[in-house]
Image (cartoon, grey):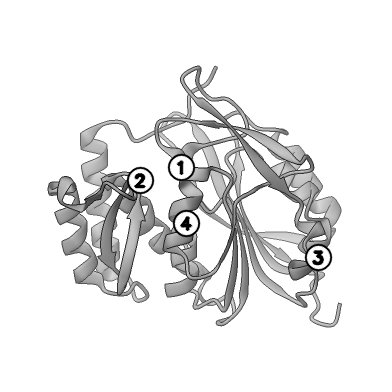
Amino acid sequence: MKQPYIYDSFLKKAIRSLELDFLWIKSAYVPNKWEFLLKKYLLLLFPNFYWDTQLKSYRLRIFKRFIYLEAPISIGPIQSTLLDYDYLVPLINKHGIIIDAGAHIGEFAFTAEFILKAKKVYSFEPIKESFQRLQKNSKYQTFHAAISASDTQKMYIPFYNIMSSGERNSVSDREETVPSIQLDAMPELLEQRCIDLFKIDVEGMEYDVLDTSKEILKKCRYIMMEVSINRPMTRPSLITIRLLMDILPNVELIHIGKVFGNAKRADAADLLFKNNDYSPKS
């Protein structure tokens, strides 16, 4: 069984953290730059000070409110997500509508709020523990559900919830049966005339999301999908992309973003698609 790539050495984590900080300082979009950096390193150096026993989360006041984290290193994915997707700013309308499939604790919800200035975000997260943090972290609408055709979905959760998947990665993964939903069965989404961005980051379940969101996809201007390459998945990546092309015949790949993996292999890659058939009158 292939193992997912994880930054597993202290040196890699330290180098990555410094790289993020350099890009953070240079960014024209991120808010509260110096406050964030100060509190990030206070959290990493003195984690016990930020542990909330009652909420079973690390609680840190930043962005003018408290955020709730699974572990001190969870601050890294928040920082990197804010940076990795600032290229969307010229493409995504301010005060737009975004679907966030695979929201985890709200990393992309922060990006939607502070970088993309979204009006509405519909965030979907199946893992109960992550969803509870998402509810506290996001000001937008949240749903405790996987996106698939079945009523429930079995999920496999590794040591860090962020890598949870519908496919088992390791014998040590714990199981959790979660509720499922089909986006095409949600009136509040179907009634939207335009969805500016559909972000899909579901650790190998991309096909399931597309297959149950065909009508919703036709309303989307852009689809940003983390496509699995070298990890367990419900369908091979080329079949998943083929399904997207069947649903949206004139969809166009316009950007390849972050690639996840190492020098020897790629586990997944962020692909941004433009729906050239989208029309606000459709």
Three-letter residue code for mark 4: Leu
Residue plotted at (47% across, 56% down): 134
Residue ID for mark 3? 218
Depth check, mark 1 against mark 2: the one in front is: 2
Q: Closer to the N terminus: mark 4 or mark 3?
A: 4
- Separation of residues labelled 2 and 4 (CA atoms): 11 Å
Q: Is residue 248 left or right of residue 12?
A: right
Residue ID for mark 1? 162
- Separation of residues labelled 4 and 1 (CA atoms): 12 Å
Depth check, mark 3 against mark 2: the one in front is: 2
Q: Is residue 270 above or below residue 96?
A: above
Depth check, mark 4 against mark 3: the one in front is: 4
The outermost residue toward the front is 54
Residue ID for mark 2? 70
- Separation of residues labelled 1 and 3 (CA atoms): 29 Å
Depth check, mark 1 against mark 3: the one in front is: 1
SS of the residue under disc 4: helix
Three-letter residue code for mark 1: Ile
Q: Is residue 174 above or below residue 224?
A: above
Residue ID for mark 4? 134
